[in-house]
Image: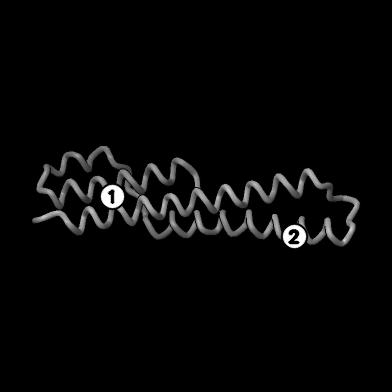
Amino acid sequence: MTTQNIDMLLSELRASAAIAAGKPASAMAETPQVEFSSVLKSTLDQVNSAQKTSEDLQKRFELGDEGVNLQDVMVAMQKASLSFQTMVQARNKLVSAYQEIMNTQV
């Protein structure tokens, strides 16, 4: 998940919270319009791709493919791990923001 995607999602949630709290809609003018589902799907696809690449390199290394070295395998594994951890943290932030919006009294 890229930082830009996370920032756009959080700004969209903040704008929704501002509207729910009765603040003026002018706060939304600064927020770029982003389709939440498309950003989420794109991000999940990126994480999935990193994990598949890591698994593929691991299998090729285990089978003795001379075109794959240990460093490439380790880097791919770390990229997959970091992207998954980032996705989980972003999910936690989104859930927290959602709960805050739901607890806002109208």
Closer to the camera in the image, 102 or 37: 102
Marks 2/1 in contact by CB < 8 Å: the verdict is no
Q: Secondary structure at mark 2?
A: helix
User: Which sits earlier in the primary sequence, circle 2 or circle 1?
Assistant: 1
74 left or right of 61 in image? left
Tell me the kind of residue under disc 1. Leu
Crowd tier of the residue under label 2, counting other residues whose Cα lies within 10 Å: few below 14, some 14–19, many 20 or above: some
Question: For the point 21% across and 54% down, which residue is it?
Answer: 101
Q: Which mark is residue 56?
A: 2
Please say if 20 is above or below 28.
below
Q: How many marks?
A: 2
Q: Secondary structure at mark 1?
A: helix
92 left or right of 81 in image? left
Closer to the camera in the image, 86 or 9: 86
Q: Which residue is mark 1?
A: 13
Question: For the point 38% across and 54% down, which residue is it?
Answer: 92
89 left or right of 25 in image? right
Q: Position of residue 17 (x, y in %)?
A: 20, 49
Q: CA distance from mark 2 to mark 1?
A: 37 Å
Q: Position of residue 59 (x, y in %)?
A: 79, 61
